[in-house]
């Protein structure tokens, strides 16, 4: 019986060390050293290998190394094998830091100030009080809620938009497509923390940008597939949006020559908003394996019909 890991190799070595300390009885293997595939009971992956169902015939659990699961083709996974997304606290901590950084950067016009510095321009940009900067979060799941909780400290009027209704103290919550326009109309800084599904692909598009107040700003920390990239460039050119912070792109790494690299209104980071922390991730997967053996409910189990 083995646990197979297929993701960032350097962090995999850390997983191996924590596994050896916490569960020496469960052999841990690092891709591509898979050993006997019939022995693999647990698989933790970022990019899933091909032919999972036929190669690993005795799989019991598949873990996503990240919080998102859009990289999986569910039809390639044996239907009886639970797919578990990563629910370790390091992901939320990283995301809260990044989202706070991005919202404050946009609130304080950092993207414009950097552009001014590059052009050797010394010019004040008037400060807008936080109480007059409305921040809206799309996706009120684990991460969206954690981010909103921290943003409360700064005094921004806060709103959130979600598939199903939520009640969050201090946050005006909207639910369902029919409320999207109302939510957007009162959002100056929009932060996307949705999972990527058939319903949310391309949701950050020109008609959404047109529904925001003129000159609004965007943070995309969901997935590159949420954003229609050409629409973002056009919306920046038209002044519909004034700047954007992007952590994700349709193609990662971003290809050479892509307009995002040098765009003066875009601050781009290489998908690092948050990262799975090996120590707490190993704790989470071992806890999940224990629950699975005892026939208990599995936190983080993906609903394949819903897509997240
Ligand atoms: P959760 O599953 O906890 O939350 C997702 C939320 O989105 C739920 O509240 C859900 O609503 C809502 N939602 C889903 N579909 C829709 C829809 N069609 N319309 C409106 N709301 C919808 O996920 P997390 O908060 O943990 O993570 C969110 C995403 O963040 C991940 O899927 C991943 O893509 C991204 N991420 C990015 C990282 C990065 O480094 N850039 C790091 C980690 C995550 P409901 O309450 O009805 O289920
Ligand atoms: C994740 C990510 O989904 O890093 O955890 O994007």
Image (spheres, rainbow, N blue to C red):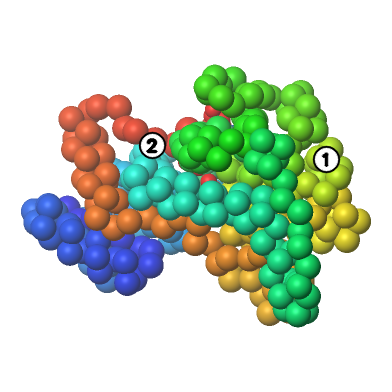
Disc number placed over residue 83 in the picture, else none: none
Residue at 78 percent across and 75 percent down: it is 121
Image position, residue 299 (x, y; %): 34, 33
- Displayed quadrant of residue 21: bottom left
The residue identified by callout 2 is: 300
Residue at 82 percent across and 61 percent down: it is 233
**Mark 1 → mark 2, Cα distance in angstroms:** 36 Å
Q: Badge 2 local density, few (<14 within 10 Å), some, or many (20+)?
A: some
Secondary structure under tag 1 reads: loop
Residue at 76 percent across and 32 percent down: it is 186
Image position, residue 172 (x, y; %): 63, 24
The residue identified by callout 1 is: 213
Image position, residue 38 (x, y; %): 25, 56
Q: Earlier in the sequence, mark 1 or mark 2?
A: 1
Task: Decide if residue 55 is on the left or right side of residue 192.
Answer: left
Toward the right, the furthest residue is 238
Q: Nearer the viewer, residue 237 or 63?
A: 237
Task: Decide if residue 83 is on the left or right side of residue 126.
Answer: left
Q: Taking the image as four quarters, which one is ligand 1 found in?
A: top right
Secondary structure under tag 2 reads: loop
Position above or below: 247 against 115: above
Q: Badge 1 local density, few (<14 within 10 Å), some, or many (20+)?
A: some
Q: Nearer the viewer, residue 84 or 277?
A: 277
């Amino acid at each position: 019986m083995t646990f197979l890991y297929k993701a960032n190799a350097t962090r995999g070595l850390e997983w191996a060390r924590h596994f050896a300390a916490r569960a020496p009885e469960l052999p841990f293997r690092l891709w591509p050293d898979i050993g006997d595939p019939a022995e693999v009971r647990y698989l933790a992956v970022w990019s899933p290998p091909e032919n999972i169902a036929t190669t690993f015939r005795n799989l019991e659990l598949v873990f996503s190394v990240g919080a998102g699961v859009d990289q999986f083709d569910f039809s390639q996974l044996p239907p009886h094998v639970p797919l578990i997304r990563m629910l370790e606290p390091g992901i939320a901590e990283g995301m809260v830091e990044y989202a706070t950084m991005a919202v404050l950067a946009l609130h304080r016009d950092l993207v414009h100030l950097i552009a001014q510095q590059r052009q050797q321009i010394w010019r004040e940009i008037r400060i807008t009080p936080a109480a007059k900067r409305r921040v809206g979060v799309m996706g009120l799941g684990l991460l969206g809620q954690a981010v909103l909780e921290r943003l409360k400290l700064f005094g921004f009027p806060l709103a959130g938009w979600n598939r199903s209704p939520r009640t969050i103290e201090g946050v005006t919550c909207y639910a369902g497509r029919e409320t999207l326009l109302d939510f957007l109309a009162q959002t100056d800084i929009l932060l996307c923390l949705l999972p990527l599904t058939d319903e949310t692909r391309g949701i950050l598009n020109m008609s959404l940008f047109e529904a925001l107040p003129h000159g609004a700003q965007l943070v995309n920390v969901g997935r590159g597939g949420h954003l229609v990239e050409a629409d973002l460039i056009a919306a920046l050119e038209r002044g519909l949006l004034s700047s954007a912070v992007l952590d994700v792109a349709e193609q990662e790494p971003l290809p050479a020559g892509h307009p995002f690299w040098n765009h003066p209104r875009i601050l781009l980071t290489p998908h690092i908003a948050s990262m799975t922390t090996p120590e707490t991730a190993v704790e989470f997967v071992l806890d999940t394996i224990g629950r699975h053996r005892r026939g208990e409910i599995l936190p983080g189990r993906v609903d394949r019909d819903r897509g997240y």
